[in-house]
């Protein structure tokens, strides 16, 4: 695995994951509102010990923005 923030398991992949939370990417998923899922993920990542090559502050800011945007819908 590359140490680049844009590697397969890096920042870009994490941001793409956040973008897709709650959008029906997983057909067997129970229908939970996207805002609820984003807030759960936000709580869960506070416990994350290792970010490896992921830019944690960037992901957290993006997640906060996603929560704000979803709350405006």
Image (cartoon, rainbow, N blue to C red):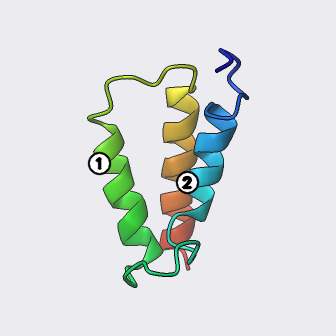
Residue beneath disc 2? 18
User: How far, Cα to Cα, is label 1 from label 2?
Assistant: 13 Å
The residue that appears at 52% across and 64% down in the rendered structure is 21
Q: Earlier in the sequence, mark 1 or mark 2?
A: 2
Where 71 sits versus 32, above or below? Answer: above
Where 20 sits versus 59, above or below? Answer: below
Q: Residue 11 shows which numbered tag?
A: none
Where 13 sits versus 71, above or below? Answer: above
The residue that appears at 36% across and 70% down in the rendered structure is 36
> Looking at the image, which residue sits at the far top?
3
Q: Secondary structure at mark 1?
A: helix
Looking at the rendered image, the quarter that the N terminus falls into is top right
Crowding near the residue tagged with mark 2, few <14, some 14–19, many ≥20 C-alpha atoms within 10 Å: some
Percent from the top left, x then y, of residue 24?
Answer: 56, 78
The answer to which quarter of the image holds residue 48 is top left
Percent from the top left, x then y, of residue 8?
Answer: 69, 34
Percent from the top left, x then y, of residue 3?
Answer: 65, 14
- 33, 28: nearer the viewer: 28
Residue beneath disc 1? 43
The residue that appears at 62% across and 45% down in the rendered structure is 15
Percent from the top left, x then y, of residue 27?
Answer: 52, 81
The residue that appears at 57% across and 65% down in the rendered structure is 69
């Amino acid at each position: 695995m590359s140490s680049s923030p844009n590697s397969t398991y890096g920042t870009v992949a994490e941001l793409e994951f956040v973008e897709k939370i709650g959008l029906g990417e997983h057909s067997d998923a129970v229908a939970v509102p996207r805002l609820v899922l984003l807030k759960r993920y936000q709580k869960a990542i506070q416990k994350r010990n290792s970010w490896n090559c992921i830019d944690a502050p960037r992901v957290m800011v993006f997640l906060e923005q996603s929560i704000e945007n979803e709350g405006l819908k």
